[in-house]
Image (tube, grey):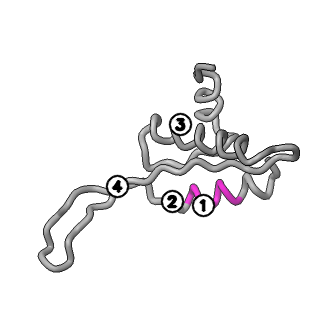
Amino acid sequence: MSNMMAESIATKRASFNATAKELKKKSTGEILGRVTISVGASMLKQGDDTDALIERADACLYAAKRNGRNRVICEVDPEYAVETHNRVA
């Protein structure tokens, strides 16, 4: 992963508000629940096909979910390494 890409992801992660947000109905003020977001980021590598790119992004996404949700995980994160190491072939 290029340094520029890693810096961009780090910047976005730093500005990412990791607090679940309440979903409120405007017309009544009723609280409908909480919303969270998990993101998996992958970068296209030379020789990749679409499946390889999506497989890595998917592994990053599931690592984000397993590590508490409301997270952004990319391929350089230790959580991604654990996710790929623990996968069953």
Residue contact at pointers 1 and 3, CB within 8 angstroms: no
Q: Pick the residue in front: 21 or 48.
A: 48
In percent of width and height, residue 73 lies at 58, 45
Which residue lies under the disc numbered 1?
A: 12
Residue range of the region highlighted in magenta in the rendering: 8-14
Q: What amino acid type should be assigned to the residue bearing mark 4?
A: Ala
Residue 1 as seen in the image, left or right of residue 25: right
Q: What amino acid type should be assigned to the residue bearing mark 2?
A: Phe
Which residue lies under the disc numbered 3?
A: 63
Tell me, for residue 20, which label it has, or none: 4
First reached walking from the N terminus: tag 4 or tag 3: 4
Q: What amino acid type should be assigned to the residue bearing mark 1?
A: Lys
First reached walking from the N terminus: tag 2 or tag 3: 2
- Single out the residue that lies furthest toward the bottom: 27
3D distance between C-alphas at marks 1 and 4? 17 Å
First reached walking from the N terminus: tag 1 or tag 3: 1
Density class for disc 2 (Cα within 10 Å; few <14, some 14-19, many ≥20) is few
Q: Secondary structure at mark 4?
A: loop
Residue contact at pointers 2 and 1, CB within 8 angstroms: yes
Q: Secondary structure at mark 3?
A: helix
For the point 87% across and 43% down, the residue is 47
Task: Report which quarter residue 11 is drawn in.
Answer: bottom right
Residue 70 as seen in the image, left or right of residue 86: left
Which residue lies under the disc numbered 2?
A: 16
Q: Secondary structure at mark 2?
A: loop
3D distance between C-alphas at marks 2 and 1? 6 Å
Residue contact at pointers 1 and 4, CB within 8 angstroms: no
